[in-house]
Amino acid sequence: MPSVCFYFQVHQPYRLKQYSFFNIGNDHIYEDEPLNKEILDKVSEKCYLPANKLMLSLIKKHKKKFRIAFSLSGVLIEQLEKHRPDVLESFVELANTGCVEFLSETYYHSLAFLYSRGEFVRQVEKHKKKIQEHFKQTPTVFRNTELIYNNDLADFVQKMGYKGILSEGLDWILNGRSPHFVYSAPNNRNIHILLKNFQLSDDIAFRFSNPKWPDYPLTASKYAKWIHHYQTNADTINLFMDYETLGEHQWKETGIFEFMEHLPAEILKNKAFNFKTPSEVIDSYQVKGIYDVHHNISWADTERDLSAWLSNPMQSETLSKVYAMEDEVIMANDKKLLEKWSRMQISDNFYYMCTKYWSDGEVHKYFSPYASPYDSYIYYINALSDLELLIHKQHALMKQNR
């Protein structure tokens, strides 16, 4: 009996303001609070509130047979706490149905695993507490920032107590095998890996409203037939995408909400199919093979690697600099400085610095609040310079008080 596993990533970063060289040493507020609130309000009205209302109605309509999963970044939850408690409450209402699973991730939507295992653990534990606080769940499945994944990560998070992890299902790694089964890592057979079907997921996330796409317009019945095609050769069909797909990336006018409203019924017309959350999939199906990933992969851009964040010297320099500050930040023993440094790790900062062209470049440009990747770099490096001054000042003060 094949399962459909819907997972949605939900994230909004703290975007930096246009922080100039002349701000260094004088202005210690790096973020564009009005812009961050403006975007949060816009996405809340276009996506979060109507999409959550729809998901709740689908759960009720199908008598809890419709089940989904979310991963909310810690920095998004913080912004909802401050500016949109109504949106946060709508997620809590979904959690209370018992049909929605909340996954674990890095609190600051960061690349910490690549640079500091200690910082990675700190952020994951902080995020877990935030999920427990609001949704009364203790996550058992992990998804790394933008589905960044390799064998070492799988082993590491299993030893942290997680039974499952999400990853991109790449053809060149699967080598002819299907992403529609549960896999494990070669160095740790106790971790269960759920692989995204990128073709079916991206049909909704990216191609849904493209009139040049041969399968346009995409209807719920047509999509359900594609799903039903796998009835005899699948355990789980994993559909992973940004939640903002609903109403923000794909506007309401495209018919995306009507599509989602009818999709569960169309899928459930075939009695062989059901919906499960990631942990339910892991509990229901046996591991069918090894997913061996020696190099880092992700769900970003056409390369599905780290090039969205590490393809040019600006990105490499700023990432190296911010993580090189870790020991000094810890030694400063100042919660405010730790929080400033933590927010500087948000992966979006480096995503905005990407200088790719063609379709990937257009996607980066769509998300960036800056005129160019070079502006993003300048504002970031200036803010980081001010943070360094604050840390050194705190060290000097501590030395003086000894």
Image: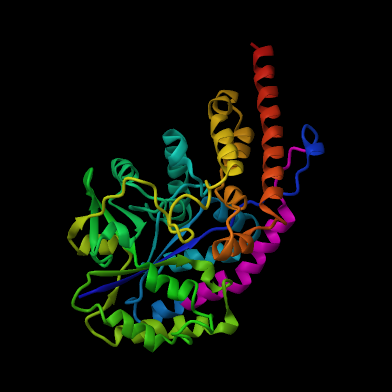
Quarter of the picture containing the N terminus is: bottom left
The stretch of residues the image draws in magenta is 27-54
Q: How many labels does the image show?
A: 0
Question: Is residue 171 toward the left or the right of residue 356 in the image?
Answer: left
Question: Is residue 354 toward the left or the right of residue 155 in the image?
Answer: right
User: Residue 382: x percent and y percent?
Assistant: 72, 38
Q: Residue at 30% across / 45% down in the picture? A: 151
Characterize the magenta stretch by its predominant secondary structure. helix
Q: In this view, does 205 lie above or below 211?
A: above
Q: In this view, does 351 lie above or below 93?
A: above
Question: Is residue 107 toward the left or the right of residue 340 in the image?
Answer: left
Q: Residue at 27% across / 72% down in the picture? A: 3
Comparing 14 with 56, the one in front is 14
Q: Residue at 48% across / 86% down in the picture? A: 216
Q: Is residue 45 magenta?
A: yes
User: Residue 195: x percent and y percent?
Assistant: 32, 61
Q: Does the magenta stretch include residue 355?
A: no
Quarter of the picture containing the C terminus is: top right
Any part of residue 16 in sight? no
Q: Is residue 280 above or below residue 257?
A: above
Comparing 221 with 141, the one in front is 221
Q: Residue at 49% across / 60% down in the picture? A: 301
